[in-house]
Amino acid sequence: MRAAIAQTDRTGREAGDMLGGEVRRQLDGDAPHALVVFATPDQDHGELLTALTAACEPGVLVGCSSAGEFSSAQSGVGMTCVLALHDPEAEFNASLGRGLREDRDTAAGNLVSGFSGLEAGGFRYRSALVLIDALAGYADELVDRLTLLTGGVYRFFGGGAGDDARFEHTVVFHGTEVVHDAAVALEILTNKPVGIGVSHGWTPGVERMRVTDAEGMRLGSLNAMPAADVFDAHAAATGQTFDHAAPVPFFLHNVLGVESADGFRLRVPLAVHEDGAVSCAADVPAGTTSCIMTTGSGSAAEAAAAATRSALEQLDGHEPAVALLFDCVATRLRLGDGFGEELAAVQNELGDVQFAGFNTYGQIAQAEGQFSGFHNCTAVVCVLPR
């Protein structure tokens, strides 16, 4: 497998022309078999994708709007980053699932209907990059349905589309089509293993609480107390300021952990309602056990490094070609300039192997032996073999 990564702060058609030309240059004139696009929301995505397609003629294209873009060479906001893959020995297919809010079964079914690995033989390893309009909700449910429909033989990784932390409108890309309330998938079929590593670096507080009222991303109560009252008590006990009118600075350092069989899945609180409920960035299942999580200044970099090592180890001795990193916009906002330390930690583990990625609204990881599901504030690293 050969890979090309390009990035620019230009927008629209100008960005597409530049990025497509750079991809062709890095691939010695070859057209990519697959192109993955992470794009700032502040541009005409249709113009970008049309120009990109014309410039480098990818076999398939998927992508999404983002909340911060990065690669081995550069990181920031307001950019577009592309990853191109060329491998005649692999197979890539792109699919689209619409209408997540209304019908996850149909959306998941449409995604899987575009996979050829369930019917065709000849490939030992089946993986798929999944990018989702997380503001539509039900991301956890969609990942579970994909796992069931594929009989557990696929490994999934990816994240939720972003809009630079505005939480207003996010979209995914399928070819030159720009779609909201949807998910896209890039099926990757290979005869070499793909590595997927997951780690978040947060630790649970002492007190476990029952989620006594929750619906989707709205958390009503913990231990029958309004969720906001629970966070108020935690702020008072730890000497922190918690302003209900501007809660994000507090929430970035005090996320909710939902206990599962393989650890705590993180949920970032976003807003406080008048009735004391709290909106989160992902679903919080009623009846589960949860607690407020804490983290240290170096934990994000350590977690990303651990996820990268895990992904590399899964290659079974094959050389890595390129890596993808997905981490939460909340992590970038919490760390500020310190987010560069996380990227440096990933690069240190990869050596001279390039990586690309974006800050997401939730991260997807579904693989055997891993901390699986839909996450917040979690580093997910995928390493593709050469």
Image: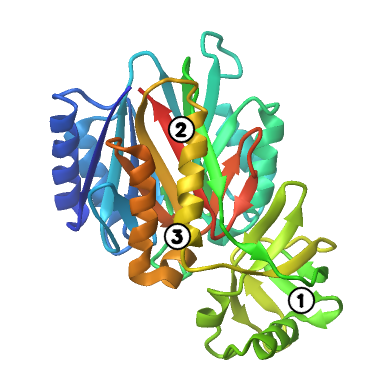
The one of 118 and 89 positioned closer to us in this rendering: 89
Other residues around mark 2 within 10 Å, as few (<14) / some (14–19) / many (≥20): many
**Residue beneath the point at 67% across and 35% down:** 147
* Amino acid bearing label 2: Leu
**Residue beneath the point at 33% across and 19% down:** 87
Relative side of 170 to 79, left or right? right
The residue pinned by badge 1 equals 220
In the rendered view of the protein, which quadrant contains the C terminus?
top left
Relative side of 24 to 190, left or right? left
In the rendered view of the protein, which quadrant contains the N terminus?
top left
The residue pinned by badge 3 equals 170
Expressed as whole percent of the image width and height from the top left, the position of residue 278 reads 67, 77
Per the model, the C-alpha gap separating discs 2 and 1 is 41 Å
* Amino acid bearing label 3: Thr
Where 103 falls versus 189 (above or below)? below
Expressed as whole percent of the image width and height from the top left, the position of residue 266 reads 63, 60
Where 192 falls versus 82 (above or below)? above
Front label number (3 vs 1): 1
Mark 3 or 1 closer to N-term? 3
Other residues around mark 3 within 10 Å, as few (<14) / some (14–19) / many (≥20): many
Expressed as whole percent of the image width and height from the top left, the position of residue 70 reads 31, 53
* Amino acid bearing label 1: Gly
The one of 341 and 103 positioned closer to us in this rendering: 341
Mark 2 or 3 closer to N-term? 3
Badge number at residue 312: 2
Residue 175 appears in the figure: no
Mark 2 or 1 closer to N-term? 1
Per the model, the C-alpha gap separating discs 2 and 3 is 31 Å
Relative side of 77 to 190, left or right? left
Front label number (2 vs 1): 2
Secondary element at tag 2: helix
Expressed as whole percent of the image width and height from the top left, the position of residue 325 reads 42, 46
